[in-house]
Image (tube, helix red, strand yellow):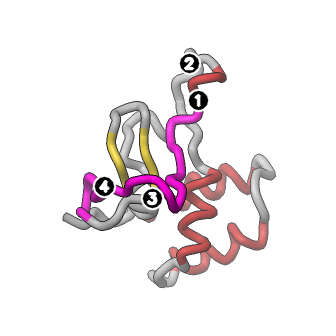
Amino acid sequence: MDNPIDFEKTLEIIERMMFAKIGKYKKWESIIKKIRNYQKWSPEELEYYSNITRIYKDSGITPRSKIYHTKLSELDEKPPCKECGERSQFYCNMNDQYFCTIHVIGHDENEF
């Protein structure tokens, strides 16, 4: 099952990141342009977005536990993505599940 990306929410997140001067402005501009033109993201853009947007609303969690998503190494076992069944790239320790680069974004209701 392939869940589409929520374009409005994704744009909102990126605009917040740009406003807070988090990440590279040129990369955000490129991604925003692709979103607005309904273009496919490159694997590098997907990885950049998913690696930099792991910010959660629950500030009561201790800083030590804020790293919820671990990028799997080439040596790690890569079970199927929970959402689409493709080869996973990330492990989420909040719910003990594996996700591909596309579905690691926004799979958790505690993310913003």
For mark 3, does the 10 Å Cα neighbourhood hold few (<14), some (14 to 19), or many (20 or more) residues? many
**Between disc 2 and disc 4, whose residue precedes?**
2
Task: Relative to 70, say whether 63 is above or below.
Answer: above
Amino acid identity at mark 3: Gln
Q: Which region is colored magenta?
A: 67-85
Question: Which numbered circle lies on residue 66?
Answer: 1
Amino acid identity at mark 2: Ile
Q: CA distance from mark 2 to mark 1?
A: 7 Å
Q: Is residue 78 magenta?
A: yes
Q: Which one is closest to the eye, mark 1 or mark 4?
A: 4
Question: Which numbered circle lies on residue 79?
Answer: 4
> What residue is pinned by disc 2?
61
> What residue is pinned by disc 3?
89
Taking the spot 48% from the left edge, 84% from the top edge, the residue there is: 39
Residue 2 figure quarter: bottom left
Taking the spot 77% from the left edge, 47% from the top edge, the residue there is: 20
Q: CA distance from mark 3 to mark 4?
A: 9 Å
Residue 14 in sight here: yes
**Between disc 1 and disc 4, whose residue precedes?**
1
Residue 38 figure quarter: bottom left
Q: CA distance from mark 3 to mark 2?
A: 24 Å
